[in-house]
Image: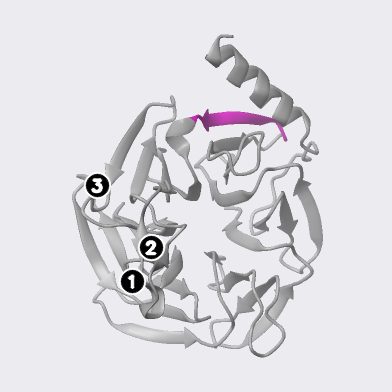
Amino acid sequence: MNTNIYLTTLLAALLATFTPPGAYANPGDLYVTDNSSIRRYEPNGTEHVFSTGLLRARGLAFDGTGNLFVATLDTAIRGDNRGQILKFTPDGIATVFAAGAGLKSPEGLAFDGAGNLWVTSNYFSAGVFHAPFGNPGPLANAGEGRVTEITPSGERTVLHLDPTTYHQNFGIAFDGQNNLGVADNLQSGIYKIAPDRRITILISASDPIGLAFDGTGNLLVSNIEGDITKIAPDGNQTLVVSGLGELRGLAIDKDCNIFAASPFFAPDGDGHDVIYKILPDGSVSVFANGLDAPQFLAVEP
């Protein structure tokens, strides 16, 4: 059988299983990947199911014309390592924007100023070993540090963060100068990809996962300890909140409120499968609960 025909048929069948989303044009609404679905929250907390039937939804990002993109880890078989990027238009039409073996394990998504989509990928490698806490053993999530640029027409360029080591990449975000920050949990740092594609280490950070830039150029970073740190353009670091349980994706609304996804249990008992909201004054509340492993967030522009 022709592989391309088979893949096209497979993806068409998959899209047919989605719950058709309604049209959307609600700036300020928060979108959340919730394992097999995407949920939408109005600023007052009212919840809507945007789409279901997804296979392990991950990164979320809006482009400049209001289309919503989501990364999924699988196509038809759970764990088949064939990721794909889906596109939802404002009138509710879902299509496959990119797919295939070259998108193994896509995680974070972000658009640059020219409308190109950037994707982090753990791109798992067999035979990688790590010694967490001094106990040798396999590190299942060790990857090659691939970051893929996809143009609006679908052309791809793959960059490698550092081919001499292994990586675990989730969140990515662009600053106002079109520099891309890439969180690397395994390397305990944040990489910077400049517009000229030059790759450097932006700053060291403890187990970074989620990234988001605010309106004044500060970088917000979440980590597995449940902290959110603000990194100013001059490198100065300020702890915003701590002890919330493992945090994943971050998003910031127009009022500078921070939203953070927490898919795991927190010490205070309130952090399991919730979305936290952190106000500019530092106060923390549970914005949404009852989710199923929320991972990534995006605020509709």
- Under mark 3, the amino acid is Pro
In the rendered image, which residue does mark 3 sit on?
Answer: 195
Residue drawn at x 41%, y 70% is 208
Q: Nearer the viewer, residue 76 or 172?
A: 76
Residue 284's label in the rendered image is none
User: Residue 146 appears at what percent x and percent y?
Assistant: 35, 46
Residue 96 belongs to the span the image colors magenta: yes
Rendered image quadrant of residue 137? bottom left
In the rendered image, which residue does mark 1 sit on?
Answer: 188
Which is in the foreground here, disc 1 or disc 2?
A: 1
Residue 174 visible in this rendered orientation of the protein: yes
Disc 2 residue crowd, few under 14, some 14–19, many 20+, Cα 10 Å? many
User: Residue 5 appears at what percent x and percent y?
Assistant: 59, 12
Residue drawn at x 23%, y 53% is 162
In the rendered image, which residue does mark 2 sit on?
Answer: 183
The magenta segment is 92-100
Q: Which element type, helix, strand or loop, lies under badge 1? A: loop
Q: CA distance from mark 1 to mark 2?
A: 8 Å
